[in-house]
Image (tube, rainbow, N blue to C red):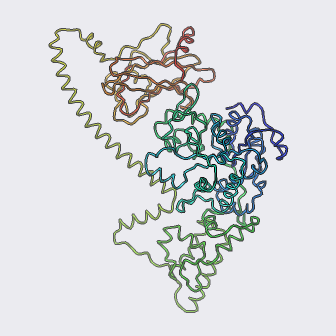
Amino acid sequence: MDEGKAVPLPVAQGWAQYDRARPAQANFVTIATPDRAAQSRVFARSARQRHPDARLTVLVPDSDESPRIFADCYDLVISVEELSLTGLADMRFRYSTAELCFALKPWLIRHVLEKLPDQPVYYFDSDIELFAPLSEVEEALAQGANLVLTPHILRPAPDQHRERALLRSGSFNAGFLAVAPSAPARAFVAWWCDRVRTGCTNDHPEGMYGDQKWLELAPSICDGVRVLRHPGYNFAYWNAHERPLSCLGGGWTAAGWPLRFVHYSQWNMREQDPAQYLSRYFRREYEPLAGLFAEYRNKVRDEGGFDGAGSPAIYREVLTPCGMPVPDLLRRAYERHAPAVDGDASEVFARGVSVLNAPSKTRADLPDLPITILYDEIWQHHADLRHRFAVDQTNGRVAYLQWLVETGAAELGLPAAFLPPARSALESERVRQLEAGGPAAVPPPLIADPDPIRQRDHDIGLLVTNNKALRRELQALKVRHWRDEETIQALDAELAQTRRARAAAARRSRQFADEVARLGPRPWSALAGWLGSSPRPTQTTPGRRPIVPVGRPFFDCGFRLSDAAAITGATVKRIKSAPSGMLIFGPYVSLAPGTYAIIVDARLYRRVPVLAHFTLEIVCDDARHLIGWRKFQLRSTARWQPCELVFTVWDGEDYPDFEMRVWARRGTALEIGQIGLYELPAANAANAARAAPQW
């Protein structure tokens, strides 16, 4: 994927020069915020390798640093101002960073179609990596398709919860789509632009998911929509259950189909390594394929993805008059109540103050105590405020406005321009109380629950509801509680199974003793070898230098066992009821450049099932580099079987943590006798490498 680094590409300075500089058959476009610059560079290099004749264009919401960041990867870097988009300041005030990028997507496609009217446009999210040419999309467009969309799933999801999540987010994924240069496609894109002008929020209760939800209507309002049902397109966490990945002959496949591109969606690489990303979004069966995700992370790191102490500014957002960012609650209130307007940043902010400082029509009308739309929004979306202040009563509303002026505005980050209505109402109430000669209004007392435990749980629930960090912690505690319950149940079941197995073994031992007594005298060592009840001694071929000690059990030589393994004498057996995963790993040794072989003596200790598999792999550099991999097949009727994996350590790979890992599925009755790690002599290394299967 580094071929693009060899020859820097000149960035065109205008559309005319851009059109002459690179004749192409398609336009690949993406949007990249500065914090996603490295991912977009990886996408550009993969697209350049698979489609060398395509034009690459990137839209940067804040283009101050774009020439320096993208000059060697893209043919053209454009800014938002070039899109001829009306109401840009309003959109920057209305939307978050992600929502703004979603809203700019159809405008970018429309802009490229206008500048290059005879060529199709392929849109990609910046966190996509191509692995093969998109021949199916080219064929669909050549056959007359106006739009090419990829569905989230091709088969039912494993559970209804995931299907409900897809119903909320939409049937089609907007991370990739292809648009033909046809009249129906242009009409659809124009309609899409109009809808995302104000309707591009991630509002799950309202059933909105950015720009993506609007694609639900594409098949019904646009002719020639092609739904591409190819498992190799848009592989991501939401469809991994139906598209198992495999690497055969150096090429990746998804559900047996050639893998076209992977969408690394929702991956925060500054906080998550590949293992954390896989464990959160994927099934456990994808843990052996972590090398694919680790390789992508290394590419992003090589492109400068983790340089600097923090992310740069996302875009030139609308600020308050004092230069402070606008809080999200203010954006959400503006999005719900303010229509789209044109103008610069100061005009948009003034419009927001005018709209949100207007009296709310949903609260009780109390004389001289108006509650604004913004104050009502804050009260509605905070359960603790609803619990503390009865805003439809005079005392409760006065107390709420007093809290806003004294502490609430600072806690919520409200600009000073939204406080005059509260101050004016409090001053009017103070004057009225003084004229009436009565006491000032005080906050109403909270109604005490006679049950202190229930009151405590209620207060904790209110606190958790309004604190995102506490919600995450509470969810983590629930997950740990569920896992502990599952572990206890599994241990109880395993204990009962062990007791039954011990009783059955005792019965078989007595029967076996009776059979031996009837057979007459027989050397016990020969009998044990005839039955295959003990592992064969590790064979040390002349010329092979052992790396780990021989003659001792391997688990005493640096190898480690997982919770799924149990030591039985000199061997290790896999607990059949344990979940799929690693059985043995280690020994974390340093290997010099050369050729090595690891030999594992294995067998199945039960007759059923007759056939089973296990995987042996070699990794290093904190499991980020996959050096060797092989899948072995065992039969329950066979004796101990030597399983050998030959691998090579090249110059520059002298890591100090080479690790062998044995992986098996749930229910595999796998038993490991001996494990040997040897350095092959130079004379035999070439023959061993040629004899080893390719992975």
Q: Nearer the viewer, residue 155 or 331?
A: 155
At 55% from the left and 83% from the top, the residue drawn is 365
Residue 200 image position (x, y, % from top left): 63, 59
Q: Is residue 482 left or right of residue 628?
A: left
Give coordinates of residue 405: x percent, y percent. Answer: 60, 74
At a point 72% along the width and 71% down the height, the residue shown is 350
Q: Nearer the viewer, residue 64 or 687?
A: 687
Give the x, y percent position of residue 22.
80, 38
- Where 199 falls versus 528 (above or below)? below
Q: Is residue 491 visible?
A: yes
Position of residue 165 in the picture relative to residue 514 (left or right):
right
Disc tally is 0
In the rendered image, residue 225, in percent from the top left (x then y), is placed at 62, 49
Query: Is 46 displayed left or right of 574 in the figure?
Result: right
Q: Does any portion of residue 588 appear in the rendered image?
A: no
Locate the C terminus and report the quarter of the image it occupies: top right
Q: Quadrant of residue 435?
A: bottom right
Q: Indicate the quadrant where residue 474 lies.
A: bottom left
Quarter where residue 655 is shown: top right
Q: Is residue 127 above or below residue 326?
A: above
Image: 78 above or below 254: below
Vertical relation: 102 (above or below) 429: above
In this view, the residue farthest toward the bottom is 436
The reply, left or right, for residue 587 in relation to residue 534 is right
